[in-house]
Image (spheres, rainbow, N blue to C red):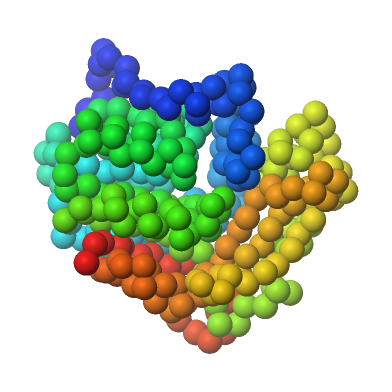
Amino acid sequence: MAADNLAPPVEIVADERVELIDRGTAPPPDGWVSRALYVGEAGARNWLGVVHEPTYALRDPNCYNLGANRLAAVRGRHPATFVSLGPGDGLNELELIQTLSGPGPGKLRYIPVDISLPLLRKAIANLRPHVEVPVGILCDFEDGRDFLASTLRRYGHPPTFFALLGGTVGNLDAGEQRFFAWVRLLLGAGDGFLLDIPLAGPDWTPADEPRLKPEAYTSAFRRFLCEAIDRNDCDGAAAVFEQRVELSLTRDAATGAEVILVADRFRRRAVLTFRRYRWEPLLSWFRSQGFAVEFARSSITSDRDKFGMGVVMLATR
């Protein structure tokens, strides 16, 4: 689809509560942990700094064979609407959109959903030349489920293809149970839900885990986290991070995930959660929650693999 410089701006439908938070005129709720990192111009700028670092692995579609596995997961699907939950700048989804659009313009609608207005606008600007974007939705897809569902009923056309990429499933503040209970209700006949899954391989040990080592966090990632730790001293992000970060590891009994918590030791509060899932236990968990696992492919091929990424397509039974 050719870009049209004279086209009117894409409408953004905003949940008023999230809009106030993103503007800085209302504080993030207590339940916002990782979500609070993305709000406002600073949050968006800091996150883009992370994903644009040369060492950010998931930016490369060849990393863990993510690009090829995503395309294999959507092969043969012909959705009318692609809903992206947390697309960042959207560029990670361009190849998917081109594949799902098929020949000819106007066959696919792309609806980005984000908690950050600057990131939402960035995704729209990057993908509008390639696909119809009827609307952008500013809302919290963990807690603003009714708002999101009603907006999608207005602007989306079934069948709908949902995506939560970039390993974001491992950072959900409220955990998997509540989120996927909503996903199960959201999916209709012919709909699909695509996920990138960060994995701990058979040979993973805590000693191998970079998220448990303060020195392994890049300068951009430290700055990103510093907004939640001490936004008044982000220029000294390295020193602040070393002094105040506390890293801990637990195991989630339901999914088998290794759960790494990044916390501010001075304020005794969480800043970010990482989960690395165990492949087979997670697939079993999805099935136990009432999903059909229509596609599942992992990059892990050896008992010596420590890390990997899986791609999963969920549908209703």
Q: Position of residue 266 (x, y in %)?
A: 85, 46
Give the tally of numbered discs: 0
34, above or below 234, in the image:
below
Where, quadrant-wise, is the N terminus in this rendering? top left
Q: Position of residue 179 (x, y in %)?
A: 43, 53
275, above or below 134, in the image:
below
Residue at x 26% of width, y 44% of height: 82
Q: Position of residue 147 (x, y in %)?
A: 36, 34
208, above or below 38, in the image:
below
Q: Quadrant of residue 229?
A: top right
Where, quadrant-wise, is the C terminus in this rendering? bottom left
229, above or below 6, in the image:
below
Q: Is residue 265 left or right of residue 91?
A: right
Q: Compare residues 22 and 2 and report the one nearer the observer.
A: 22
Q: Is residue 256 left or right of residue 216?
A: left
Which residue, as the protein is rendered here, is positioned at the far left?
104
> Could one spot residue 43 in this view of the protein?
no
Q: Position of residue 181 (x, y in %)?
A: 38, 57
Residue at x 47% of width, y 66% of height: 309
Q: Compare residues 176 and 121 and report the one nearer the observer.
A: 176
> Could one spot residue 258 in this view of the protein?
yes
Residue at x 74% of width, y 63% of height: 248
Residue at x 55% of width, y 26% of height: 22
Q: Is residue 47 left or right of residue 106?
A: right
Q: Quadrant of residue 152?
A: top left
Q: Compare residues 258 and 75 and report the one nearer the observer.
A: 258
Which residue, as the protein is rendered here, is positioned at the far bottom?
303
